[in-house]
Amino acid sequence: MPVKGNSYQQIIEKIFVSRYKKGERLVPFARDDLVSTAAKLGVKLPKNLGDVIYSLRYRSALPEPIRKTADAGMAWIIRPAGMAKYAFAQVKDYKIIGNPNLASTKIPDATPGLVAKYRLGDEQALLARLRYNRLIDIFTGVTCYSLQNHLRTTVPEMGQVETDEIYVGIDKRGVHYVFPVQAKGGSDMLGVVQIEQDFALCAKVFGKLVCRPIAAQFMEDDIIALFEFAQMDDGVKICAESHYKLLPPHEVTDGDLETYRRMASGDI
């Protein structure tokens, strides 16, 4: 029996190869194809079929035979295409990864000790730190409030979508915003598909609010990278990125504060 990762790759590769024709940029398939293809290959599927798609989106690259068919400067992703339906689609090739050369801002850590002690999993720990330290407010410059965790809804032509946390906010002009937040910890990768889904979710549920999708990820040395996205004519783009490091208050020194003051005034 192949290991789980290999079996998932075998299944998804077989589905793609059986449907792809040279030059195509969209290759649809259905959830039932996972079951029939696994049976043909003699591999066991998990009870949660969605784990196959999730793993190939956020935990590992698509198999090489799929990747090599992409046009120059493009990459294949797996998009939702309706209830129990998906599609391989070609998009501009870029990864949502924190810039290692970007300076980080030190923030006095306001995470309650009990929350830090009993946090469950990297993703939930990251969401808690964003919430207690008001990092969404700091990053966006908008006063924000957490509205709901794990909001799920059904979007036409996509099917069911989910975002990790929803914030709503208001700025000094009275403009109302909605911030869908995707968080990834550990080795899981942020993906453009999640951001596309967040735009669609906001259009359906919060159509009168300004949608500003946010993604968060732990980097090395416990640095938190935050990204904001914009929907452009040629797809989703990163429009802002900042890095934050949460520290005990006494470790944010007068020298740090002087540096931030000078940066704010344009002296450096």
Image (cartoon, grey):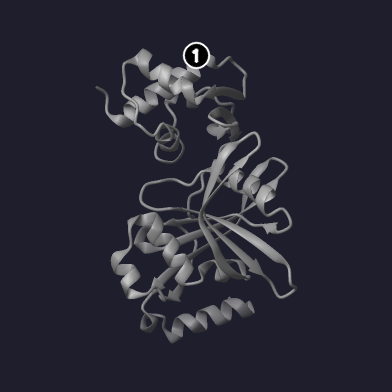
* Quadrant of the rendering where the C terminus is positioned: bottom right
**Element on which disc 1 rests:** helix
Quadrant of residue 145 in the image? bottom right
Residue at screen point 46% across, 80% down: 256
Q: Residue 102: x and y, percent? A: 50, 61
40 or 100: which is nearer to us?
A: 40
Q: Is residue 139 left or right of residue 133?
A: right
Residue at screen point 57% across, 70% down: 137
| Classed neighbour count for the residue bearing mark 1: other residues with Cα under 10 Å, few (<14), some (14–19), many (≥20) | few
* Quadrant of the rendering where the N terminus is positioned: top left
Q: Is residue 208 left or right of residue 118?
A: right
118 or 219: which is nearer to us?
A: 118
Q: Residue 199: x and y, percent? A: 64, 48
Q: Is residue 194 left or right of residue 39?
A: right
Name, please, the residue furthest toward the bottom. Answer: 254
Q: Write down the residue under mark 1.
A: 18
Quadrant of residue 91 in the image? top right
Name, please, the residue furthest toward the left. Answer: 1
Q: Is residue 193 above or below residue 221?
A: above
Q: Is residue 233 visible?
A: yes
